[in-house]
Image (cartoon, rainbow, N blue to C red):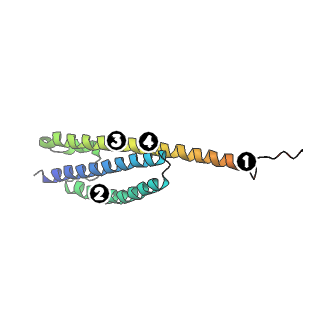
């Protein structure tokens, strides 16, 4: 009777694992930015794109699983209360675990974004400083 719910709990765990991969990727991207490793940043962004495609596929699967339980368009915050009483505790634990994994991902993502933005501002300042310098570098004293 509760197979569909348990399948959804398994789906939530898979989603959480993907979020953990994204979290590690965000940490690696932030480290690459701090070390001025442009190739490392690029590699992280390519992996991020691949994982985002996986997220899209999982989003469709989530919709199908929820529809199969008669819970179409139910948000994670309301899922626990839609579950049968007998498995609500299990649902609450699965929801809390997924939320915590998501919060860790958001935190790592924010750090990576902020680090990247700071480095971009530094590059912009350096470029502005370069454009203010005279052509050829130093100014020569020709009064001799």
Callouts 1 and 2 close, C-beta under 8 Å: no
The residue under the point 75% across, 53% down is: 136
User: Residue under circle 3?
Assistant: 104
The residue under the point 50% across, 49% down is: 36
Callouts 3 and 1 close, C-beta under 8 Å: no
CA separation, marks 4 and 1? 34 Å
CA separation, marks 4 and 3? 11 Å
User: Residue under circle 1?
Assistant: 133
The residue under the point 53% across, 43% down is: 118
Which of the two discs, 1 and 2, labels the residue nearer the N terminus? 2
Which of the two discs, 4 and 3, labels the residue nearer the N terminus? 3
66 horizontally vs 48: left or right: left
Which of the two discs, 3 and 2, labels the residue nearer the N terminus? 2
Which of the two discs, 4 and 1, labels the residue nearer the N terminus? 4
Near mark 1 (Cα within 10 A), the count class, few <14, some 14-19 or many ≥20, is few
In the rendered image, residue 123, in percent from the top left (x then y), is placed at 59, 47
Instruction: Tell me the quarter of the picture where residue 141 sits.
Output: top right
User: Residue under circle 4?
Assistant: 111
- Quadrant containing the C terminus is top right
CA separation, marks 1 and 2? 53 Å
Near mark 2 (Cα within 10 A), the count class, few <14, some 14-19 or many ≥20, is some
Outermost residue toward the left in this view: 1
Nearer-the-camera pick, 69 or 134: 134
The residue under the point 17% across, 50% down is: 5
User: Residue under circle 2?
Assistant: 58
CA separation, marks 2 and 4? 25 Å
**Front label number (3 vs 2):** 3
């Amino acid at each position: 009777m509760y197979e569909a719910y348990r399948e959804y709990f398994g789906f939530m765990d898979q989603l959480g694992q993907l979020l953990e991969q994204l979290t590690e990727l965000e940490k690696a991207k932030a480290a690459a930015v701090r070390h001025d490793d442009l190739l490392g940043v690029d590699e992280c962004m390519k992996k991020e794109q691949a994982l985002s495609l996986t997220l899209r596929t999982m989003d469709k699967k989530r919709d199908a699983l929820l529809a199969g339980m008669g819970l179409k368009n139910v948000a994670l915050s309301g899922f626990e209360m839609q579950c049968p009483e007998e498995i609500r505790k299990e649902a609450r634990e699965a929801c809390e675990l997924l939320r915590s994994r998501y919060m860790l991902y958001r935190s790592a993502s924010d750090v990576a974004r902020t680090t990247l933005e700071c480095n971009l501002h530094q590059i912009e300042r350096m470029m502005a400083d370069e454009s203010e310098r005279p052509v050829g570098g130093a100014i020569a004293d020709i009064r001799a």
